[in-house]
Image (cartoon, grey):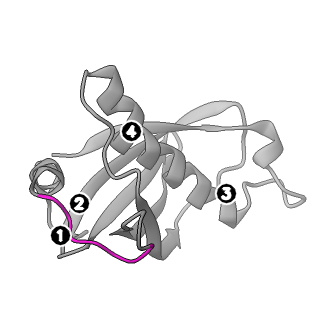
Amino acid sequence: MRFQGKAHVRWDDLDAFGHVNNATYLTYAQEARSDFLWFDRVRNGFEPMLNDMVVGRTECDYLLPIVLGSFDLRVDMWITNIGNSSFTMEYELISKAGLHARIKTVQVAVSMETKKSRPLSSAEREFLTQYLEAAV
């Protein structure tokens, strides 16, 4: 199963070349990830999850430039690996123009007391497992 989020492309995301700057794609992934793990859960009566995590790794394949602003991208997200204290998420940024990017992040759960990685809880694993798919 995939979570479908969205990210808004703002006019000021466009750079001097007339397309969205590469770093902004990661902001779109972050906004969609926040919805997936926090806001959507709250809207549906659940506790937010994994607010104590950091990004340990990011990869992005830029496939099609985004050359317009003021519209929403669809951001499909799923989990491709669940480790002891981390998990890997993949994302596809999509608009009517096509598939703009594939992104992969490794999220690491962190203990707020020690500021070091911590094991994922059984509730976190159960939630993430619902979205587990093979890597693209």
**Image quarter in which the C terminus is found:** bottom left
Instruction: Please name the residue shown 74% across and 61% down the image.
Output: 21
Q: Name the residue under label 3.
A: 24
**Residue 68 percent coordinates (x, y):** 72, 41
**Would you say the residues marked 1 and 2 are in contact, meaning their CB atoms lie under 8 Å apart?**
yes
User: What's the magenta region?
Assistant: 115-121
* Residue bearing mark 1: 82
- Nearest-to-viewer mark from 4 and 3: 4
Q: In this view, does 115 lie above or below 24?
A: below
| Cα distance in 3D space between marks 4 and 2 | 16 Å
The residue shown at (80%, 50%) is 14
Task: Compute the Cα span from label 4 to label 3.
Answer: 21 Å
Where residue 20 sits, quadrant-wise, is: bottom right
Question: Which residue position is annotated with label 2?
Answer: 79
Residue neighbourhood size for the residue with mark 3, other residues' Cα within 10 Å, grouped as few (<14), some (14–19), many (≥20)? few
Q: Are marks 4 and 1 in contact (CB under 8 Å)?
A: no
Amino acid at the residue labelled 1 = Ile
Q: Please tell me whether mark 3 sits on a helix, a strand or a loop.
A: helix
Image location of residue 81, percent across then percent down: 19, 71
The CA span between labels 3 and 2 is 22 Å
Left or right position of 112 against 80: right
- Nearer the observer, 77 or 82: 82
In the rendered view, tell whether residue 53 sits above or below residue 29. Answer: below
